[in-house]
Amino acid sequence: MLPIFPERAVDTPAVEVLLDRAFGPDRRQKTVYRLREDTSPIAELCFLSYGGAGVDGSIRFWPVEVAGRGALPALLLGPVAVAVERRSQGLGRALVRHGLAAARQLGHGAVILVGDPSYYGQFGFERRLTVSLSLPGAVDPERFLGLELRPGALAGAAGAVLPSWRCLRAA
């Protein structure tokens, strides 16, 4: 098992450098970043791994809600980043497993993400759980996936996925 630690405030600059290297400096233009605006990731669900050069892996979860079903709470997983020199060593899988286990233990019911179906399918993410959901921008629909941490958590879910603060202000 690879050592995984909670992210601390002091780690944030190094995580941001890792994310820029993994996804490029234009990563903030992606649709999922609209769901992260004006909010913070859930501190208890931010984890990382350290290597010889500092932070070499990171995962974060963000609070979101499906507006069309009475503000159904969910988590947005991402980004998951692994330093180039650590890829293909199982660190990404370890981070995802660790993060999902922590989310389940904290009582969260559902997780959504935009990512590679062949990769995230190994953790149980499925497209069928998000077919009635929409994001605030364009994404490849085949990459918009969901996972129920609690059976039935996304049953009947339909509508726009929004940052939690937007649902609170609209109420």
Image (cartoon, helix red, strand yellow):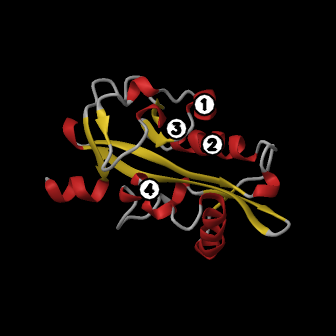
Residues tagged 3 and 2 counted as in contact (Cβ below 8 A):
no
Query: Could you say where residue 33 lies in the image, as x and y percent from the top left?
Result: 42, 58
Q: CA distance from mark 4 to mark 3?
A: 27 Å
Q: Which residue is mark 3?
A: 104
Query: Could you say where residue 62 lies in the image, as x and y percent from the top left?
Result: 44, 54
Q: Quadrant of residue 84?
A: bottom right
Mark in the foreground, 4 or 2: 4
Query: Could you say where residue 25 lies in the image, as x and y percent from the top left?
Result: 56, 68
Q: CA distance from mark 1 to mark 3?
A: 13 Å
Residues tagged 1 and 2 counted as in contact (Cβ below 8 A):
yes
In primary-sequence order, the first of circles 1 and 3 is 3
Q: CA distance from mark 1 to mark 4?
A: 23 Å
Q: Which residue is mark 4?
A: 30
In primary-sequence order, the first of circles 3 and 2 is 2
Q: Secondary structure at mark 2?
A: helix
Q: Nearer the viewer, residue 91 or 108?
A: 91
Q: Nearer the viewer, residue 30 or 55?
A: 30
Lateral position of residue 69 relative to residue 11, left or right:
left
The quadrant of the image that shows the N terminus is: top right
Label 1 Cα neighbours within 10 Å, binned few <14 / some 14-19 / many ≥20? some
In primary-sequence order, the first of circles 1 and 2 is 2
Residue at 77% in and 62% down: 50
Query: Could you say where residue 136 lies in the image, as x and y percent from the top left?
Result: 30, 50
Q: CA distance from mark 4 to mark 2?
A: 21 Å
